[in-house]
Image (spheres, helix red, strand yellow):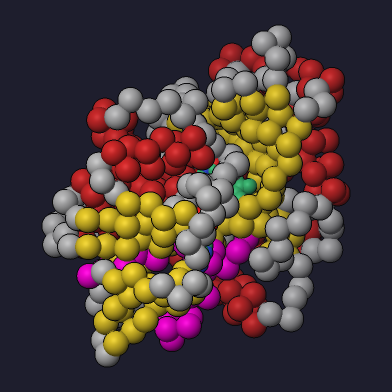
Amino acid sequence: MRVVVLGAGVIGVTTAWALSRAGHEVLVLERQQAPAQETSFANGGQLSVSHAEPWANPQAPWQILKWLGKEEAPLLWRMRADVAQWSWGCRFLVECLPHRTRRNTQSLLSLGLFSRRALAEIRDELDLNYHQMQRGILHFYTDHAAFEHAKRSAEFLSATGVERLIKSAEECLRIEPALADSRDPIVGGTFTVDDESGDARVFTEALARACAQRGVDFRFGATVSTLERHQERIIAAKMTDGECLVADAFVVALGCHSAPLLNSLGLKFPIYPLKGYSASIAIQADTMAPYVSLTDEAHKLVFSRLGDVLRVAGTAEFAGYDLRVNETRCAALMQRTREIFPSLDAVSQIEFWTGLRPATPGNVPFIGVTEIPNLWLNSGHGTLGWTLACGSAKLLAQMMSGMRPGIDQTPFRARYGD
Ligand SMILES: Cc1cc2nc3c(=O)[nH]c(=O)nc-3n(C[C@H](O)[C@H](O)[C@H](O)COP(=O)(O)OP(=O)(O)OC[C@H]3O[C@@H](n4cnc5c(N)ncnc54)[C@H](O)[C@@H]3O)c2cc1C
C-alpha cells in the first residue's frame, strides 16, 4: 500500500519507520527543511513510561486556580476568546475526575510499556546514538505533603505492575549526587529504574536517515494545505503550491496542527497546543550537573543530560499557537534550576526554546482510523510524545496492515465522542 505520512516530528518519523518495516511504500511530507524542527526539537528528553499520570488529575483544577494570572506559574491558563480553548478546558475538567484519571493512567502505561519494547527493537536493529541514558528517572520532592502524596501514588501503581521505588532524601543523593548542593533541601523521591532519557531530535533525525535508506521518500519544505476528499475516501494531499499527491492511505501526524486540518474535513478532535519551555545549558566537565534524569514535581520541571548539554524543560501555558519566548517564564525556570544546582550560577551559555505540545484533555493520544476509512491519525501525545512515539507508530502500523494489535487499541481510537 502507498501511504502518505503528514509531518516529520518524532511521531511522523517513527510512523514512517513502522509502516516501511511492515512493507508499505511511504512518502513523508514536512513543511520544515528537516525532521523534528517543531515540538520534537528540544523537549525534556525523558522516556518516562512509569510516570504516565496525566496532568488532568483531581488536584489539577485547584492548582490551576491557585496559579491563575501568575506569570511565572508552572501551569498557566491565559484566558482567550477562543472557543477551542474553552471547550478543551471543559473536557479537561471532566478528565480530572478520579475514575477518568485512573483509566487514562492505565491506558498511557500500557502504551508506554509497549513503546519501551518498540524502542528497544529499533535500537537492536539500528546503531543509533541519541545521547541515550538508561539510568532511570528520579522524581524528587522538596515538600513533605507532596512526598506523602507521591508515596500513595507509588502504591497504586505497584498494583498495576509498575515499580516506583520510594527513596529517602539520603538515598536520592546517592542516586544523583549533583542534588547534594540544592538550596531547597530534598525531602525524598521516587525512582523508576527502567525509565530512560535521550535526545528526541537527534533520535528522529537518525531514524529519518534509516528510513530513507529503506526507501522512504521525504519531501521537506512541503506544506499540506488540504486533503482532497472524493466520496468516502481521501484521494490526495494538496500542497500549498497546488501539487496533489495521491496515495492509498494517509496518516495525519501534524502534532498540534492536526486538529485544524481534520476540522476542515468536518472531523473534530480536541487536540490543543499546550506551550512549554526548555533551556539547553552548555555544561563543562567539572559542572555539578546530574547524570540521572530528574523531575522536580513542585515546579513541573525535568532535567536531562543530553551529551554536553543539560536540558531543563517544563511548564505549561494554555496560550493558543503563540510560540513567543516570555522572559519572566525563562527567568523563573533558570531561578529554580540554579536553586537546585548552584554550580550553574556561573553558566551563561543558555538557549531558550518554546514548543507546543499536542495535548488532548486526558493526555491520551488518538491512534487509528478516523471516520474516513483511508484516513488515519497518530496525534495528541501531549506531554509524552517522545515516550510514546515508537509504540504508537508500531500500533498504528499493525492496525493499518491488518495485523493483530500488540495492545488493546480501544482507549486510543481516533473517533472522538464514540
Ligand atoms: C517543553 C516540552 C517538554 C517536553 N518534554 C517531554 C519529555 O520529556 N518526554 C516526552 O515524552 N515528551 C515530552 N514533550 C512532548 C513531546 O515533545 C511531544 O509530544 C512530541 O514532540 C510531539 O511530536 P509530534 O510529532 O506529534 O509533533 P511535532 O514534533 O510538532 O511534529 C509535527 C510536524 O508536522 C509538521 N507540520 C505541521 N503542519 C504541517 C503542514 N501543514 N504541512 C506539512 N507539515 C506540517 C511540523 O513542521 C512538525 O515537524 C515535551 C514537550 C515540550 C513542549
The quadrant in which the N terminus is found is bottom left
Q: Which residues are magenta?
A: 248-274
Task: Determine whether 224 is above or below 34 in the image.
Answer: below
Q: Nearer the viewer, residue 75 or 240?
A: 240
User: Does 273 appear in magenta?
Assistant: yes
Q: Nearer the viewer, residue 144 or 389?
A: 389
Identify the residue at horizontal 82%, vertical 26% (top origin).
348
Left/right of residue 162 with respect to residue 58 in the rendered view: left
Q: Nearer the viewer, residue 378 or 384?
A: 378
Q: Nearer the viewer, residue 165 or 367?
A: 367
Residue 370: image quadrant is: bottom left
Residue 291: image quadrant is: top right
Task: Determine whether 87 is above or below 205 in the image.
Answer: below
Give the farthest residue toward the left: 403
Q: Is residue 365 visible?
A: no
Identify the residue at horizontal 29%, vertical 78% (top origin).
235
Residue 132 in the image: state x and y as whole percent.
46, 26
